[in-house]
Amino acid sequence: MSERFDLVILGSGSTAFAAALRAAELGKTAVMTESRTLGGTCVNRGCLPSKNLIEAARIVWEAQHPRYPGLRPARIDIDFNELVRQKAQLVHDYRDRKYRSIVEDADLIKVYEGHAAFVGEHAISANGRVLEADQFLIATGARPTVPPIEGLADVPYLTSDLLTSGEPQELFELPGSLVIVGGGYIALELGQMFHRFGSQVTILERSQKILKDYEPEVSLAVTEALRSEGVNLVTGVAVRRVLQEGDEILVVAERSGLEQRFRAQRLLVATGRAPNTDGIGLDKVRVELDDRGFVPVSDQLRTNVPYIWAAGDVIGRFTGSQLATPVGAHDGGIAASNALNGERRAVDHAVIPRTIFTDPQVAVVGLTDAEAIGLGHRCWCNTIPVELVPRAGAVRDTRGIAKMVIDADTDKVLGVSLVMRDAGEVIHEAAMGLRLGATIHDFIELVHVYPTMAEALKIVAISRYKDPHKLSCCAE
Ligand SMILES: Cc1cc2nc3c(=O)[nH]c(=O)nc-3n(C[C@H](O)[C@H](O)[C@H](O)COP(=O)(O)OP(=O)(O)OC[C@H]3O[C@@H](n4cnc5c(N)ncnc54)[C@H](O)[C@@H]3O)c2cc1C
């Protein structure tokens, strides 16, 4: 049986949904396909469940480690199974409200279950159904990579899929101890979360420092924050092999030429994300991939085949994109408009704020110092400790830094990096500033609410002209 649509979408994640909704707005029919769970990674096993459990872990940790003299530590008993149950319920409710009901209410959008693959130039097949169209969108997302570590195939290991609901990979028991291979954002977020729930956590990062694409001050501040609360963060370590020893997993690694061994009840592999582009028949339509399997696209999100588009995690860093939900959602709509309406809209990935939900949070936008210099800017940049922000002192949480990068000739702000509480909220002021071409003076002259963490932006800007240690309250 074959059916015809204006747009056939491989995947049903946030990128696919944005594209399908845009198609419907244009009065066109669209079909999504899903081999796993409607809604994709973010709602089912990424953003939503991780942020739900990270916040629960923060509550547990703060009760045990109050920042205020006069507040005594309190122990919160953890029923991990119940926490997992509420997480599943939350995901279920959210998926119903934000994904399933939207499809049910839309006449022009359909979703079919099944693994989709191209079977002809203008046809895919999913679960025995053939879906035909003039235009196609690849929005199949990414999955955890499995590195070639000796012995890994012979031991049980977790991936970030432990956050999923109703799939066999879901984790129901809190590990007593956990070794995490990898030191990217998922490893850091989940590592701190498990540590705060009471697991003994070791994070093994191959590079000499974590978050090496971020400002060095960011890496240092996060390293300090995690180590000071007891996470065993080991850098410059290469994992050589893993094996089961009794009830534990033994990780044999090499650090500075010496063998080091780490043991834990559970192993979590968090070494990055690989695109879901294998097994979808791209050879049939001659869509080209890069050497890691990501789909190269033009700035209009067109692949090398004129009627096939791609967006979301599956395009990796092409067009300066980021593997993040709002980027895919933004681009999915653009891809659909370009495919169906003959528009020639280019994506603009110059200003993408990003957050790592550790505590303190990391939030960045724009260029790093090194990137700005690499692009030929004459830079001024400065970093202030968050202890200079009145709000941080008032609430007794002075961890972190704020860094601003500006073009010294035009005074334009090029980038901001924050490590502090609420950084993920504050970064939007910086992002809007960058979008509107703000200069350092805009950040100084904008009256900021006192005392808020957003004042970090004003203070780091002022530090170009004055010693930020000698400011009075909110004086400029
Ligand atoms: C642990 C974790 C935490 C995260 N936290 C955040 C966060 O806080 N903020 C943020 O912005 N981003 C976060 N992300 C990233 C975010 O989840 C992704 O960037 C986003 O989900 C990508 O959306 P997408 O639609 O491109 O792909 P996906 O959401 O992965 O959707 C693709 C869908 O396609 C399906 N599929 C694949 N192949 C086929 C096929 N052949 N046929 C049919 N269906 C197929 C997949 O099953 C999947 O459901 C997190 C990710 C993880 C893993």
Image (cartoon, rainbow, N blue to C red):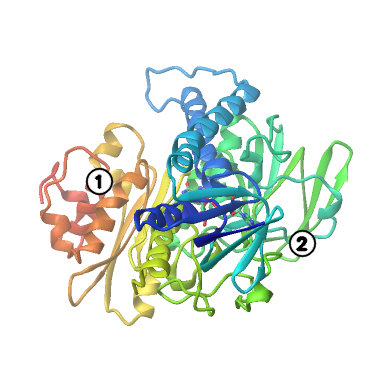
Q: Position of residue 265 (x, y in %)?
A: 77, 37
Q: Does the rendering let one see residue 365?
A: yes
Q: Report the amino acid beneath label 1.
A: Ala
Residue at which label 2 appears: 258
Which quarter shows the N terminus? bottom right
- Residue visible at 26% across and 44% down in the picture: 389
CA separation in Å, label 1 and label 2: 45 Å
Question: Mark number for residue 454?
Answer: 1
Among the 4 quarters of the image, the one containing residue 247: top right
The foreground one among 55 and 108 is 108
Would you place residue 210 above or below residue 343 in this image? above
Q: Position of residue 299 (x, y in %)?
A: 41, 75
- Residue visible at 60% across and 49% down in the picture: 112
- Extreme front residue here? 1
The foreground one among 293 and 265 is 293
Among the 4 quarters of the image, the one containing residue 320: bottom left
